[in-house]
Amino acid sequence: MKMEARRFLLLLFLLSLLSISTAATTRKIRARKPCKSMVLYFHDIIYNGKNAKNATSAIVGAPQWANRTLLAGQNHFGDLAVFDDPITLDNNLHSTPVGRAQGFYFYDKKEIFTAWLGFSFVFNSTEHKGSINFAGADPLMNKTRDISVIGGTGDFFMARGVATLMTDAFEGEVYFRLRTDIKFQLANPQSRHEMAATRLTSTLVLCLLLLLLSSSTATHRRKIRSRRPCKQMVFYFHDILYNGKNAKNATSAIVGAPAWGNRTILAGQNHFGNLVVFDDPITLDNNPHSTRVGRAQGFYLYDRKDYFTAWLGFSLVFNSTQHRPQRKDNICGA
């Protein structure tokens, strides 16, 4: 009986240590500011038929009454532009870029200037590695506009937040500069050192606890360990691009191209400015003839002039027995 009482008291003591450690870590997390913040500028120079060397964006889609060199009439309704713009820390176009803003925007209202954007900041500086993804409506006549931070990679893994845009300068219909004030949270707000310290403390306490727990608790522990914080899936999707001769088998088609391109053959070196819509089969292996478990449906656009890179927005729509019918996983990014 005395041994059981001592074991019980030791168990209570260790549990209290674990609670204190967890509470202290929680207080540290709460004491921090809830968001990280960055202010960056990106500079857009639109192709106008005369500035091919310096242009960082191009009209790739336009309504019937317009063309792909000049923005379409009043408020540019229907124009779709693809861009690969330099990002700087200040508002000077000639400052050293810390990355690229890559994506698209289209003008989506007839009465006033307003646009919809989908793009990524892709960093290449020593200070930051990775990317941040953005999407949302941009009512251009407002002084400031908020769009969503919808994800990230590298240093910005699983970022979520808001970016406030402000038109910092514009010159006619050829150049504009956007100030981007980004506030975001990452998947885990703890620093690496705090995470390591928390894990060490928790591990020591738990090891002692495990010596006292019964076999039933050990079984329960194995069940907990079998769970993972993230689910993982690997799929292949197969894209057959329309080339003017394969209409029957094609699963994708060029729907937008710059003025120097066309919608049958991809536009010149690196295909800059081409916009492709696709409805591709998904398989569990790399064989295009394997049983299809769903469709990959969406678009991709080539958004850089000097080498191959693209921006994607699409959904995986499942139709297999393994996954819920009509389940959709939405994906976007550079």
Image (cartoon, helix red, strand yellow):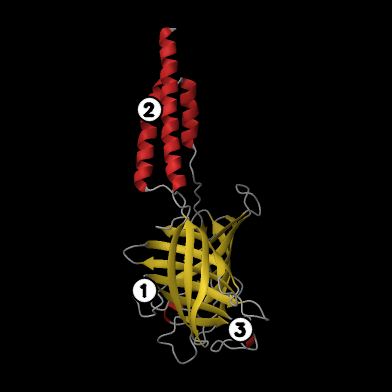
Name the amino acid, label 3: His
57 and 33: which one is in front? 33
Position of residue 166 measured from the top left corner of the image (x, y, whole percent)? 52, 73
Q: Quadrant of the N terminus?
A: top left
Between discs 3 and 2, the one toward the N terminus? 3
Between discs 2 and 1, the one toward the N terminus? 1
Comparing marks 2 and 1, which lies closer to the viewer? 1
Position of residue 20 measured from the top left corner of the image (x, y, whole percent)? 43, 32
Query: In the rendered image, is residue 187 in sight?
Result: yes
Residue 76 has which mark?
A: 3
Residue 37 lies in what quarter of the image? bottom left
Task: Work out how far the residue at label 2 is from the one at label 1, CA to CA, in angstroms.
Answer: 50 Å
Position of residue 177 measured from the top left corner of the image (x, y, whole percent)? 47, 78
- Do the residues under discs 2 and 1 have CB atoms within 8 angstroms? no
Position of residue 275 measured from the top left corner of the image (x, y, whole percent)? 54, 75
Left or right of residue 257: residue 19:
left
Name the amino acid, label 2: Cys
203 and 138: which one is in front? 138
Which residue, as the protein is rendered here, is positioned at the far left?
Answer: 126
309 and 160: which one is in front? 160
Residue 247 has which mark?
A: none
Residue 250 lies in what quarter of the image? bottom right
28 and 327: which one is in front? 28
Task: Work out how far the residue at label 3 is from the one at label 1, CA to CA, in angstroms.
Answer: 29 Å
Residue 97 has which mark?
A: 1
Name the amino acid, label 1: Pro
Residue 207 has which mark?
A: 2
Look at 39% across and 22% down and name the residue there.
211
Task: Work out how far the residue at label 3 is from the one at label 2, CA to CA, in angstroms.
Answer: 65 Å
Which residue, as the protein is rendered here, is positioned at the far top?
Answer: 1
Look at 46% across and 21% down and name the residue there.
215
